[in-house]
Image (cartoon, helix red, strand yellow):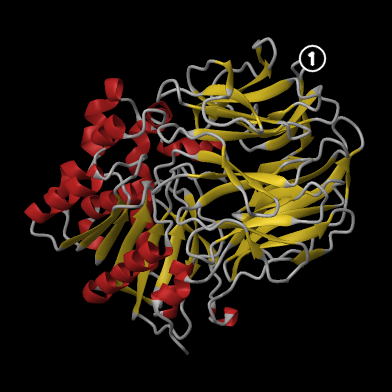
């Protein structure tokens, strides 16, 4: 079998985040051919696209105006997540800066119905809180009008059909939100989701008549379902049950009532397409003939006769498909390159379940390289971040590289992961944090029983919260590991919470515990305070501009590991934030990872 270097795998391209133009004859999307996502456009499937933006920084979103031949897009600098907005004329020749406040975050809230205005939230006034703004399309800089002064983490879910109201989403935590309707002219805010306990209200869409919101929620349920919220009565009515799984997204076209919603069934997306025939009834259309994997990011064309959707799979790199709404016929529009690597060499995972310390079954994806010999195969245990996240069967060039080089790959969804119901998600909250680390140890025990695995060559790797899990696994179960790779990970929960972005602290304390009430516990579980136990060689990768997990987390764990005479290496990128967006940096980071593992594993 042919082998390919890491640069080749990291040149496998991704096309995603599609948006139809106002006449339905153009499709824009983000494509990373140049090394970072930029805006591209095409008007026919599988034709050569036209590049519209040419920046060295990543484009974070792009969305067409509903009536004008122009689109808005977002971009930050060096991964700092302080996103700014720009307007791009349809010919791609003119770009106008719309915000020009580089010290503030801006969160897009959508165009109004004729594209004369757009809305957003921003922390311009105070770093830790977000206010609501409305801005004319041809205004710039500080000309936006603040229409509501907030006191927390606010985002927007779109304009009402008559353009008089906005839906305001206030996040108390990742698993608890409140929805409000904001009268733009009066500034009056109405709370439409009063509730007790933690309830999620997500994927919010205005109903066709503006008298209701269609959304996904877990109000009164362990899993999320599609619901209609009547704004006059305040009632929540079920439109489609999730069953044992979450309904994790919905897109609704206001004019036609056509909609697409998705269920997350053990990580795989199952789509339902249809149209509303009543307030809570749907006439379903045939299921789209899309590749099996993970799909989302729906954008309807102006008449809702078609929709664009991003699709990825374990053996399919990310591309944009266009689906005929009524028939389900799907066609791949983009042709993101696999860098000359034959797709037939990509390996699919097997969905497995292993038993943890308390008898609970933990799901995981397990991939075995071709030609693996019994008892000789090293394994990378790749732990997702979040923790309110889920490893799903999407395309990973990093995973495929290591599989190509003879490593097996193990991706557990330990307790605390999303996708398996509310109860499962909260099993790792605060004082139960280390139970999720114990799940990792149980996963390693399961790997020991697999015929192909070399039990002396098991690696822990993960990013962000997954980086914490790596460090915790290495310090709690030191004899299990041949090496560890910590990518933008948390070493010390106290310093992390003290130094993370002001706007994030409240949300993170809701998950991990607060500095005021739980400091002693947070110190006890922080890997930095248990570093004396570490035995395995450690590689630490970070971005200097990381606003979520500041680079000090990397610096302190490296220094402390050195005092234990542990082989430790560090690589910090001055132009990156929470992860690595630039191709040259990804190549350097993961080539370094491969060399590190070659040396120690």
- In the image: residue 180, left or right of residue 453: right
Question: Does residue 76 sit above or below 288 in this rendering?
Answer: above
Q: Residue at x 26, y 51 (%)?
A: 471
Q: Position of residue 458 (x, y in %)?
A: 31, 67
Left or right of 130: which side holds 568? Answer: left
Q: Position of residue 221 (x, y in %)?
A: 64, 31
Q: In the rendered image, which quarter is residue 448 located in? A: bottom left
Q: Secondary structure at mark 1?
A: loop
Residue 192 appears in the picture as rendered: no
Displayed quadrant of residue 218:
top right
The front one of 328 and 20 is 20
Residue visible at 37% across and 53% down in the picture:
463
Which residue lies under the disc numbered 1?
232
- Asked whether the viewer can see residue 1, the reply is yes
**Which residue occupies the foreground of this view, 529 or 169?**
169
Where, quadrant-wise, is the C terminus in this rendering? Answer: bottom left
Sort mark 1 into few (<14), some (14-19) or many (20+) by Cα contacts within 10 Å: few
Q: Position of residue 523 (x, y in %)?
A: 22, 34
- Relative to residue 534, is residue 118 depicted above or below? above
* Outermost residue to the bottom: 1
Q: Exactly how many numbered labels are in the figure?
A: 1
Q: From what the image shows, is residue 431 above or below residue 189?
A: below
Q: Residue at x 71, y 49 (%)?
A: 298
Residue drawn at (21%, 57%) of the image: 478
Residue 324 lies, in percent from the top left, at: 85, 58
Q: Nearer the viewer, residue 56 or 601?
A: 56
């Amino acid at each position: 079998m042919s082998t390919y270097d890491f640069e080749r795998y990291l040149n496998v391209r991704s096309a995603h985040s599609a948006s139809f133009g106002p006449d339905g004859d153009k499709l824009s999307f983000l494509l990373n051919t140049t090394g970072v996502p930029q805006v591209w456009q095409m008007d026919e499937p599988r034709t050569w696209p036209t590049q519209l933006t040419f920046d060295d920084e990543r484009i974070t979103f792009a969305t067409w105006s509903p009536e004008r031949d122009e689109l808005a897009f977002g971009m930050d600098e060096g991964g700092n997540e302080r996103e700014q907005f720009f307007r791009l004329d349809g010919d791609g020749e003119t770009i106008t800066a719309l915000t020009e406040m580089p010290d503030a975050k801006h969160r897009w809230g959508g165009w109004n119905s004729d594209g004369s205005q757009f809305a957003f939230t921003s922390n311009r006034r105070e770093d830790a809180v977000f206010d609501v703004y409305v801005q004319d399309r041809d205004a710039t800089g500080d000309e936006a009008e603040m229409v509501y002064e907030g006191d927390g983490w606010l985002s927007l879910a779109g304009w009402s059909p008559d353009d008089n109201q906005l839906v305001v989403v206030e996040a108390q935590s990742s698993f608890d939100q409140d929805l409000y309707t904001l009268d733009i002219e009066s500034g009056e805010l109405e709370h439409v989701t009063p509730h007790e306990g933690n309830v999620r209200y997500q994927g919010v869409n205005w109903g066709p008549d503006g008298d209701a919101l269609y959304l996904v929620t877990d109000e009164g349920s362990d899993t999320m379902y599609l619901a209609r919220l009547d704004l006059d009565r305040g009632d929540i009515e079920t439109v489609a049950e999730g069953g044992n799984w979450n309904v994790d997204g919905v897109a609704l076209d206001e004019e036609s009532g056509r909609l697409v919603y998705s269920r997350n069934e053990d990580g795989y997306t199952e789509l339902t397409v249809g149209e509303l025939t009543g307030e809570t009834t749907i006439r379903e259309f045939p299921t789209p003939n899309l590749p099996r994997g993970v799909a989302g990011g729906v954008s309807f064309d102006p008449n809702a006769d078609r929709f664009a959707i991003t699709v990825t799979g374990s053996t399919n790199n990310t591309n944009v498909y266009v689906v005929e709404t009524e028939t389900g016929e799907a066609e791949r529009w983009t042709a993101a390159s696999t860098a000359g690597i034959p797709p037939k060499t990509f390996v699919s995972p097997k969905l497995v379940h292993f038993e943890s310390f308390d008898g609970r079954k933990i799901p995981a994806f397990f991939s075995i390289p071709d030609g693996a010999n019994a008892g000789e195969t090293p394994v990378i245990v790749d732990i997702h971040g979040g923790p309110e996240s889920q490893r799903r069967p999407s395309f990973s060039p990093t995973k495929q590289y290591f599989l190509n080089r003879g490593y097996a790959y193990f991706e557990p969804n330990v307790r605390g992961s999303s996708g398996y119901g509310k109860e499962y998600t909260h099993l790792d909250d605060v004082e139960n944090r280390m139970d999720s680390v114990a799940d990792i140890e149980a996963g390693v025990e399961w790997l020991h029983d697999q015929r192909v695995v070399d039990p002396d060559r098991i690696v822990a790797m993960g990013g962000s919260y997954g980086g914490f899990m790596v460090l915790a696994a290495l310090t709690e179960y030191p004899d299990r590991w041949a090496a560890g790779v910590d990518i933008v990970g948390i070493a010390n929960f106290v310093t992390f919470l003290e130094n993370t972005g002001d706007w994030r602290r409240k949300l993170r304390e809701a998950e991990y515990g607060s500095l005021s009430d739980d400091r002693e516990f947070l110190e006890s579980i922080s890997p930095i305070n248990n570093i004396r136990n570490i035995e395995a060689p450690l590689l630490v990768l970070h971005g200097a501009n990381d606003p979520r997990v500041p680079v000090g987390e990397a610096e302190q764990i490296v220094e402390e590991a050195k005092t234990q005479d542990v082989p430790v290496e560090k690589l910090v990128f001055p132009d990156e934030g929470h992860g690595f967006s630039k191709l040259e940096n990804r190549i350097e980071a993961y080539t370094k990872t491969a060399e590190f593992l070659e040396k120690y594993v």
